[in-house]
Image (cartoon, rainbow, N blue to C red):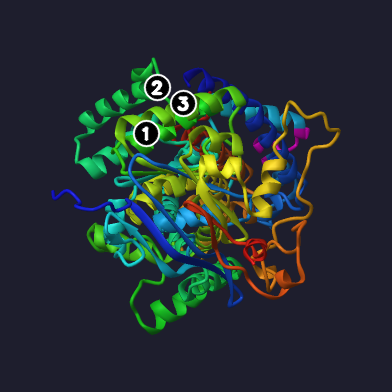
Amino acid sequence: MLEPKQYRPLLSVNNLRTSFFRKGVELPVVDDVSFEVSSGETLAIVGESGSGKSVTSLSVMRLIPSPGGRIMGGEVLFDGMDLTMLPEKRMYDVRGNEIAMIFQDPMSSLNPVLTIGEQIAESLRLHKGLSKGKAMHKAIEILRTVGFARAAEIVNEYPHQLSGGMRQRVMIAMAMSCNPKLLIADEPTTALDVTVQAQILDLMQNLKKEFNSAIILITHDLGVVAELADKVIVMYAGKVVEQASVRELFNNPQHPYTRGLMQSVPKLDQDEDRLFSIGGNVPTPDNFPKGCRFCTRCPQVMPKCHQQQPELIKVGDNHLSRCFLHEAADV
Amino acid sequence: MFNYLLRRLITVIPILLGISIISFAIMQAAPGNPAVMTMDPTISAEARARQLEALGLNDPIPVQYVKWLSGVVRGDFGLSYTQRRPVMEMILERLPNTLLLMLVATILAMLVSIPIGIYQARKRGSALDYGATVFSFAGLAMPNFWLAMMLIMLLSVQMGWFPVGGVSTLGADFSILDRLHHLILPALVLATSDMAALTRYTRSSMIDVLNQDYIRTARAKGLVERTVVYRHGLRNGLIPIVTIFALMLPTMIGGSVIVETIFSWPGIGRMFISAVFERDYPVIMAITMIAAVLTVIGNLIADICYALLDPRIEY
């Protein structure tokens, strides 16, 4: 193996466009999204439901529900290969082996009729060619790593015998079993109790250090972002609206949507009767406004916003934002 | 599990008792009686009364039932009115033929409909999916006596590919091939409606399962589609199908009555029809009870299958 001579991100997604088709009409659920992640780095993708963040991650895995959805354009460069061009056969070696995924709902993401051990060992046998016995042995080992004291018994249990937090740890064990270079975690803590959330986040943090994996963390929880992420992209209605390092984003949010999100987080030192919320809903893809996609809900909307789509503009070091307000400020 | 089976077997007793009372009552309520249907109409009224007395048919119906029941408990289903032979003996002669027919029909239904249903679920909206749907509905809508006669007319009479009926060629030595040759058409007819229903159920069950989160997890592991569908999908998809199997058994017994009659298949279905026409009460009751027992066994097997397929179910 040659060491890469120059810096190259592990994953670089360029101008990704993924659409769903309903009655022949193209609905661009992910529209011109670009980002990069390097090994040992955590990228958070933040946005409300319907912003296209899950579809972005499924596009990377090439697991868009088909028929119905399709990657229409752009490239997903992973370790130098364009995954969008890879034959399906080669994708089987990438999925679960080099890129692994953790899903939102641990209650439904494990197969109810297979034991925990079988489900973890399956990846190991497939990708690492381990024998049944060796894979089971390794499964026990991994379960210990994710904090199961009774790992040797857990392998013979079924998902319904475990709690939500335990199941999510099993999911993580499954995802980490083949030491993937990239871990995609789609709202890994959303369905869990707050106390369990902290455990899972700790676990992911430790695994990242141990394996030096890159992590894409999809969430709408800004607390989780602050805890885990190195950099953040904020998505709205299929577009990236702001991109920055986590510190920069929290200290200096530029896009009106990001600011809205920040304000919706309850703060202890403020004594308000009502929590702030951004009025309205994310428009659905068949309903995207012609101009800026946020114009229907933006508190600082200008006439121009209804006419034209703003571009991503550099507003600081490694800080991009998609808003006409920054142009106005420059002038 | 053993305790559960024992409990289930105990609950079977009142069920069978209930069935026997209802069938006995319905049978008696039907117009006509053995005297009218089978006795020589020219004998004197006195002789007829003597015969009825000898058969016990002059007793009040509850007494007749209790007499019948006390025989059954001792394994004695009585003598056939028309053949003057023990009913049990007659049934044991013919039951294997019916069971063979039902077994082959069930296997045929399974082998055809489950793979087709899975294929339809995977390729929803494809031409083959629509084609199979059309065939399923046709299969459900076609009365089996009509289908049987069409097949006999086309494949047996006109093309000469299959015998028109019976279990084997008369006078020929026993051969498995000859038996199968005779078995194909009746089994196919008996299986048709279940095949159609099972295809529909498999399709919808697999569509449901393939949309589950754990299927996405399996795909994210890098498993090939075949493993995803058969290892992760099918076992979950089969759980509801098991119920359909349990329900299929009684309809098959009903279907065998028609199919056996049309294909002159010497099974208990055909025997049942002639017994009904002759008001041969002991034979009718015996076959009804066998059908009831088979149905109960089918349900029991379904319950055992649930526990085998689904670890969440414990007894």
Q: Is residue B178 above or below residue A113?
A: below
Identify residue type, mark 2: Ile
Left or right: A138 as drawn, with respect to A229 = left
- Quote the CA–CA distance across marks 1 and 3: 10 Å
Rendered residue at 41%/35% (across/down):
A114
Residue A158 pos. (x, y %): 45, 28
The mark closer to the camera, 2 or 3, is 3
Residue located 32% across and 27% down the image = A142
User: Between B300 and B291, which is closer to the camera in this rendering?
Assistant: B300
Is B312 above or below relative to A33? above
Give the number of callouts: 3
Q: Residues within 10 Å of mark 2 (few under 14, many from 20)?
A: many
User: Disc 2 marks which residue?
Assistant: A154
Q: Which residue is mark 1?
A: A208
Magenta span contains residue B53 = yes
Q: Residues within 10 Å of mark 3 (few under 14, many from 20)?
A: some
**Of tags 2 and 1, which is closer to the observer?**
1
